[in-house]
Image (spheres, rainbow, N blue to C red):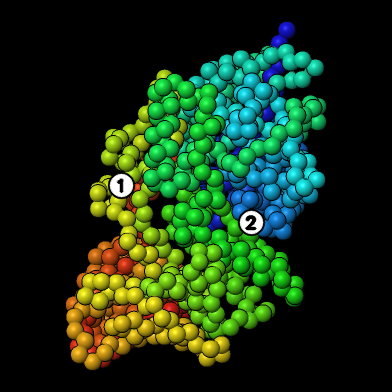
Amino acid sequence: MSQPVSLLFGVHAHQPVGNFPEVLADAHRRCYKPFLEVLYRYPRFRFALHISGWLLDYLSDHYPEDIALLREMVTRDQVELFGAGDTEPVLAAIPNRDRIGQIETFSNKLEMKLGRRPEGAWLTERVWESTVVPALADCGIRYVIVDDYHFLCAGKTTAELTGYFTTEEDGRVLDLFPISEALRYRLPFSPPHEVVAHIESQANAIGGGRSMAAIYFDDIEKFGIWPETYHWVYEKGWLDNFIQGVLASPLIRTQHYRDYHAAEKTRGVVYLPTTSYIEMNEWTLPAQPANIYASLVRQAKTAGWYEGNRAFLRGGIWKNFFSRYPESNWMHKRMLGLSSRLSMLRDRTHDETMTRKLYEAQANDAYWHGLFGGLYLPHLRRAVFRAMIELEAMLDACEGRAAQFVEDTDLDGIEELYLQNGLIQAVLKLDGSGSIFELDSYALKHNFGDTLKRQVEHYYERIFRSGSGSQHSGDGIASAHERVSFKHTIGAADLEADDHARSLFVDRLNGGYVAYPHPSVPAEGRGSSVELLSEHVGKNIELAGNGIYVSYRFPSGASGVFSTEINIAMPSCDGWGGRYIHEGAILCGFGQLLELSAMDGLTLDDNVLGGSVKLTTSSPVALIAKPCYSVSQSEGGFEKIMQAVTLTLEWPLRSADMVVSLEVSTSQDIAVPV
């Protein structure tokens, strides 16, 4: 006789730190609220829930009735809560001290808000490294969930993955549950009766009294936010029908992970390789290797040997995003530096506030790119930098830094020069470009250098190879992984890669880039300035007050045309809140082309920023201002996203020198025309 299969059903709810309020409201309306309301009607349907700390705080503040409903479901033992890092960091990417702090912070929050501490934990993006075991175990976490793919990569077979396994690291023990990929791809896209039948097919009498587990844990956003899913899951009743089918089945029993874990014994010891879910392993590869990998997968599927051997046709690992994207690596290494400064701070009186800012800077979303990753989304990067700039200001107040210093922050073999005066900070990479790639305003808590270099992505070939629309078969709906659709019209010019970093003050003389191989860094105590020298140009960069002043000197008799490109991250991007102001008049928005033949002053005003940047030149110059867009993919389709305002200043070499300045003002300091 078959004994019932234990359905361990879990969902993961998350929104990135800094996401738009309208996105959060829509997610609540289409997913979080209706999901809880449907599940509340079925108290016998036990399930697990992980909700990230920042989202839990947001829902508690804006929708307390839903959190009250959830607490009631926890109290009546319908819901098992899962822990994690509070701001949803990739635990493997942060120091061990911060892993422990993040996990403990979130476990305390769950106990305070929902009445119970977790025994299990969700691993962000299912990124597994054995180094995370000690922190999880030391925080009282007894088990985590990873994909069955992780186990296949370790040599296990699907038939063996009927329960949990045990691993150890540095003397600590942790149990691991394998999530079924077959269920991940069926829920909620296949008809309910087919999903129930699939679960029932796993019911089997197992020797030694062991019960088989059907293990599911995946994004709750699939139940209402992904394309087509709200109509399918709620209006057409998929979720109700699925729950009713499960509860009516004599071969399925819903069970909490903790109850299954307490009642069953481990299936044995296992050591998993460093990996994430299978799609992530492709996304983390650069374009050319990713295309090779995708081609090999297609060949394997065509030849019919992929499914049985896919664990051995493997892509990259999550940390490859740091080597693939310099912007991600820079954020990460800046965050690590601030974490180290905080840990060594002797005065601990402000730890709680500073620790909260550090944890916000560790939120995973802005550090990677794939179908769901947010590196291409400026507002998510901005949230990370905002937290880091706030933390840095607090650390400086406790223990000041020199006005200028040099270090190789991002470990790329090229040193960076920091200039700071307590109000603003400029960071130059000493690579000969003479440009600024981080420009921070401590008053506005913003990095004006937070832009993204356009590079070729592996999915570009799909843009023109495939038509728009979704691809699926049968009576269900398409998963976001299967869809090919377009949110914007994309042409060949949109896919061109940049040949230089999108930084500030990228100089050209007669069309060629100017190289500054010999920076003259002043001795400590001589102020926040630097002199850059090239064969034809002298360039001085100096901070004063809330401004940065860049002076160019040219030898007598110099001829030709000189230009400098200034890429500035303005939070409004091409939205309605950003505009150019010239001589008291609003000219246009940041998303439009602007050309001025003789300009010596222009204000970039941004109501999202809560301030402005005033561009001034010592002599009139020609100006071209235009938006810089990148092309990326999301669950909604291929899209263009504005990354920066690109200002190009150009002038003939008729004068001996030129001074270009950027002065930062808060909204309280300026009078803006209506």
Q: Residues within 10 Å of mark 1 (few under 14, many from 20)?
A: few
- Can you give x and y, in whole percent of width and height, for residue 121 in the image? 69, 42
Q: Is residue 501 visible?
A: yes
Q: Horizontally, is 540 left or right of 225 in the view?
A: left
Q: Residues within 10 Å of mark 2 (few under 14, many from 20)?
A: some
- Can you give x and y, in whole percent of width and height, for residue 559 in the image? 19, 84
Above or below 304: residue 595: below
Q: Residue at x 55, y 56 (%)?
A: 17
Residue, disc 2: 94
Where the N terminus falls, by quadrant?
Answer: top right
Q: Residue furthest top?
A: 1
> Which secondary structure lies at badge 2?
loop
Q: Residue at x 53, y 82 (%)?
A: 404
Could you say which is closer to the camera, residue 468 or residue 433?
A: 433
- Can you give x and y, in whole percent of width and height, for residue 504 in the image? 38, 72
> Which secondary structure lies at badge 1?
loop
Kind of residue at badge 1: His
- Can you give x and y, in whole percent of width and height, for residue 672 in the image? 36, 77
Q: Horizontally, is 197 left or right of 576 in the view?
A: right
Could you say which is closer to the camera, residue 425 or residue 166?
A: 166
Q: Residue at x 25, y 76 (%)?
A: 509
Kind of residue at badge 2: Ile
Residue, disc 1: 488
